[in-house]
Image (cartoon, helix red, strand yellow):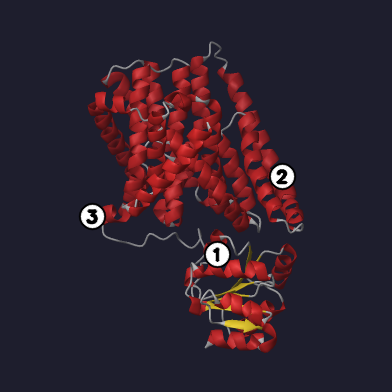
Amino acid sequence: MLTIIVTTLLLSLLINIFVRKIHLPTIIGYILTGTSIAYIFNLHHAVSNHDLKEIAEFGVVFLMFTIGLEFSLAHLKRMKHEVFVTGTLQILFTSTIVYLVAHYGLKLDQNSSFIISLVIALSSTAIVLKLLNESGEINRRHGQRSLGILIMQDIAVIPILLIIGFMSSSAHDITSALQDMMISAVILLAFLWVFGKHILEPFLTQILKTNSDELFVGSVLFLAIGASYLAHILGFSYSLGAFIAGMLIAETKYKHQAEADLIPFRDLLLGIFFITVGMQIDFFLLIAQWHIIVLLLIGVMVLKFIIIFALVRLNESKRVSLKTALSLIQIGEFSLAILELARSSDLIAQPYSQVLIATIVLSMIMTPLILKHLTPLTDMFIKKEDENIPNEFFSDELKDHTIILGFGEFGRNVAAALKEKGEFYLAIENNINTFHEIQKMGEPAIFGNALKKEVLKKANIKFAKYVIIAIDNPAKLYHVCQTIEQFVDNSKIIVKVHTQHEKNIIAELGITNIIIENQVMSQQVSQLIIE
């Protein structure tokens, strides 16, 4: 096992270095790693391992949790049309057409036709949302339309799995099963709502008062995994529980730090998930049935494109509709789970299952290439237009602002001087007590650790006029300066230190605007910024 793990890590590093050099997403590298490992160690049987699948699924769980953090109940309410209307119609139209073609056109049996129709109706939450998040296009109109449809597809997985359970069971007490599902849904939503409304924020506040980063990380992991587990034991998908938990934390002031702390776990587990996807590629089947797989792949993509484009076009521009349709033409990871359950219940013949798995994986491999060139592909057909989300969805982007890291006496004096001169600033504070004081003062601030790149991105640091680093911890100060240098030019960084020795250490980074606190007043710093 250790040999397999070490080889997998080595291969994923080497393949992804090559993949990034040719400007392709690492998702493709992980899938190729999985395929290579499966053939090197003859691990195709391991793909059906329940424990491995559950570990890999938590990559999607953490992805949905971070998507929930970007959301809120107000956002979901505003997106009700995308989720409940467009998303539902897309699933119904796609599955109905596929069923009719499979059963009446290709003469497949009813069970196989039904399973195939459900499999093809779903798209890949893991790939699409990961890539849209990385590119920032999740905040554009086509990103939001894609997100709404994917949320509905994730919700639909629950009744789909329930239906497959009915089909494979000798007992057909559908009324009783539906009642159980409704009761479970009420219990899940009620518990999470009460927890989020009355317990969540006080709980996180007490955790942060310990000044222990690892306790906060642990609490975020507990909330994400705990909510997903609660949803699972009540009969729902892991990812739905995680998404709801993320939405609840999005209503608190700790959302930015929670997201920054969870991203490394999310990306690592997503890597495992895509490796397991790659392990399911059977080259012998691809060679033997390549013509069927290619025709099926083209047919599925064309059908889903037409349906999604037509539905989105009802209340959107052609360009946004085109981008949304291109983003969702693949088949998703939940389809693999549906196929596995149907196969184990003898609801679909083995040859159909293998051809579909190959088609799904190939469509997932093609998706990063399509999303990477989404704008150029769209430009070929439709002229460019404004695709930004209207202001009611997201606040205006910050620009030419000053970021203050550390809101002690020095930072407050600088902030007061900037405010007096009419200059906008944003504070980033990691001490919970100080953060509460800033909030009481009514000053603009976000809670988070300045060492976390995601927190800095939320402050739109690349477009900042200046970044003032006024952190009193000398050991942390050096690392923060190193992190900030990755986003802005040294000329925009102003660092406050206490001693000449600290100044000499920071100067080694190439930063020239270094101020010894007892040698200059914060008023002079604000004057430098204004000038």
Pointer 1 residue: 456
Location of residue 91 with respect to 13 vertically, above or below: above
Q: Position of residue 398 (x, y in %)?
A: 51, 70
For residue 380, the mark is: 3
Q: Nearer the viewer, mark 1 or mark 2?
A: 1
Give residue 466's mark: none
Other residues around mark 2 within 10 Å, as few (<14) / some (14–19) / many (≥20): some
Image position, residue 396 (x, y; %): 50, 67
- Tag 3 secondary structure: loop
**Label 1, label 2: how far apart the Cα atoms are:** 29 Å
Label whose residue precedes the other's in the sequence (3 or 1): 3
Can residue 84 be spotted in the picture? no
- Seen at 53% across and 24% down, the residue is 162
Return the x and y of residue 78 as percentages of the image width and height.
Answer: 52, 52
Q: Earlier in the sequence, mark 1 or mark 2?
A: 2
Q: Nearer the viewer, residue 220 or 103?
A: 220
Up-down: is 29 above or below 390?
above
Q: Determine which of the numbered discs, if any, sits on residue 195 in the image.
A: 2
Q: Quadrant of residue 356?
A: top left
Snapshot quadrant of residue 518: bottom right
**Residue type at tag 3:** Met
Q: CA distance from mark 2 to mark 3?
A: 49 Å
Who's the residue at 49% across and 21% down the image? 164
Amino acid at pointer 2: Phe
Q: Position of residue 32 (x, y in %)?
A: 37, 39
- The type of residue carrying mark 1 is Leu
- Is residue 515 something that shows in the picture? yes
- Does 153 sit left or right of 504 as displayed? left
